[in-house]
Amino acid sequence: MKTNKKIYLGVFSAILLCISVFSCKKQGIENGVEPTVKKSDQMHEFNFGGNKILIKEDKGTYYLSDDIILTEQQFNLLKANSNAAMSSTARALIMNSLVKRWTNSIVYYSLSNLGADTASSLKAMQYIARVSPLTFVQRTSQANYINFVKSTGNSSSVGMVGGAQNLNLYNYNTPGIIIHEIFHALGVMHEQCRTDQSSNVVIHPENIPDDKEFNFNQVSVSGYTNYGNFDFESIMMYEPYAFSSNGQPTITKLDGSTYQTSYPAANMSPTDIAGINQLYTGFTYTGLPANISYEIASALDNTKLLNVPGSATADGTQIILYTDGNTNNARWNVTKNADGYYTLSPLHALSKALTVVGNGVANGTKLEIRTNTGDPTQQFNITPEASGYYIISPRSVPSKNVDVPGSNTANSTLLNIWSYGGANNQKFKFNTF
Ligand SMILES: [Zn+2]
């Protein structure tokens, strides 16, 4: 059952060995001069073949970004790897040991320092465990474990670093942020740091304070590799205005436009899920079976279904909760696109799709049916909850979940979207009939 073997595939931007990456990458060794490691204040600058990486040192702790803690050993490995004269074989050995995965996909944790605020951290671990081979086990006497700590900020080590490793949380009530930090502890870096950063986004240093620039490193380090296509919806992707000094975007798409700003997502994107399964193998996550028709029941009351009132077919007809009447206006054909997002079309009007009204992002925005054009407001991330229930998040606003407002299960209650709440009014069962 050992999975922590020789196949070092990266997730998104994990620093892991990838033969194809290091073998084809020039490292600026032409003059054989060891690159300078400049120290200015507490910022270290490493040069990897002309691409600089900034690492902050603060009171003896190293940071690859504000929330990624490097051990001294990891820092020294990166420093060694910036030696341009090093052979690719030696480089491979270094990268092999930089980020370690958790043995047998078992992660030990301690929540004792979170006190009463442990529930959302447990929830975040459960979300990851449901979609991956990872098992999270409360530590008894194991040497290597994640120690959740209530802190003034959010940060984590990267990978299993040995011994107790703190996972510092400020937003300990926000599972999306906790999942993000746990992903670091599992060995995953930020999406914007991918080696293909410059072919997917533009970083705007003029809008970034100098001491925050290191959050936008493009880590073109030998052995640092990516999983899948660049994913703007990744739970590891910073929002367009992250660390802005002047209200202007710090990250844009290549055309200068911004992307969804509702950071953090409530849950992992489909690509995040695929990536973590690539990193920790031994399990194939398929998600909710698609190309099947379902009745979608609220976890508050299994007899109440998502319903198109009166079997209307007009665009803009808003979705309600209604008693199961075995009719096609409360049955949804569920299809899945190549990115892993789902489209839900009512059986009585298959050309229509469940849609977030008006591309709204605010709490309370209603849901309707509208002619299916494949718009992000018509695509949903559907992830498992406990006991066969699922959470439904619009692709257009991944920080929100489909929600029964006020947990009111009366017939004709209008469905809406709302920030993560963790209660049964945001959980739904997909029943075949
Ligand atoms: Zn992070």
Image (cartoon, grey):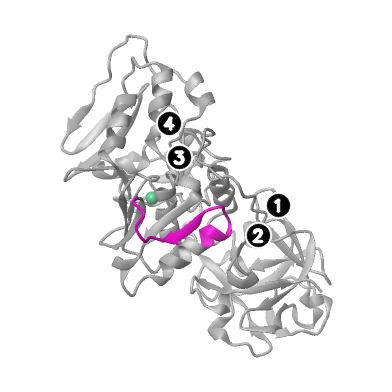
Q: Quadrant of the C terminus?
A: bottom right
CA–CA distance between discs 2 and 3?
28 Å
Location of mark 3 (residue): 14
Q: Quadrant of residue 301?
A: bottom right
* Callout 4: SS: helix
Q: Quadrant of the N terminus?
A: top right
CA–CA distance between discs 2 and 4?
38 Å
Is residue 363 rendered to the left or right of residue 402? left
Label 2 is placed on what type of residue? Gln
CA–CA distance between discs 1 and 4?
35 Å
Q: Earlier in the sequence, mark 3 or mark 4?
A: 3
Label 1 is placed on what type of residue? Asn
Q: Earlier in the sequence, mark 1 or mark 3?
A: 3
Label 3 is placed on what type of residue? Ala
The answer to the question of whether label 2 and label 4 lie on touching residues, with beta carbons closer than 8 A, is no
Q: Is residue 47 visible?
A: yes
> What x and y, as percent, mark residue 212?
28, 45
CA–CA distance between discs 3 and 4?
12 Å
| Numbered mark located on residue 337 in the image | 1
| Numbered mark located on residue 409 in the image | none
Please check the rendered image and state whether residue 254 is part of the magenta-colored stretch, yes or no.
Answer: no
Q: Earlier in the sequence, mark 2 or mark 4?
A: 4
Q: Residue at x 30, y 25 (%)?
A: 80
Q: Residue at x 31, y 36 (%)?
A: 74
Label 4 is placed on what type of residue? Asn
> What x and y, as percent, mark residue 323?
74, 87
Q: Quadrant of residue 369?
A: bottom right
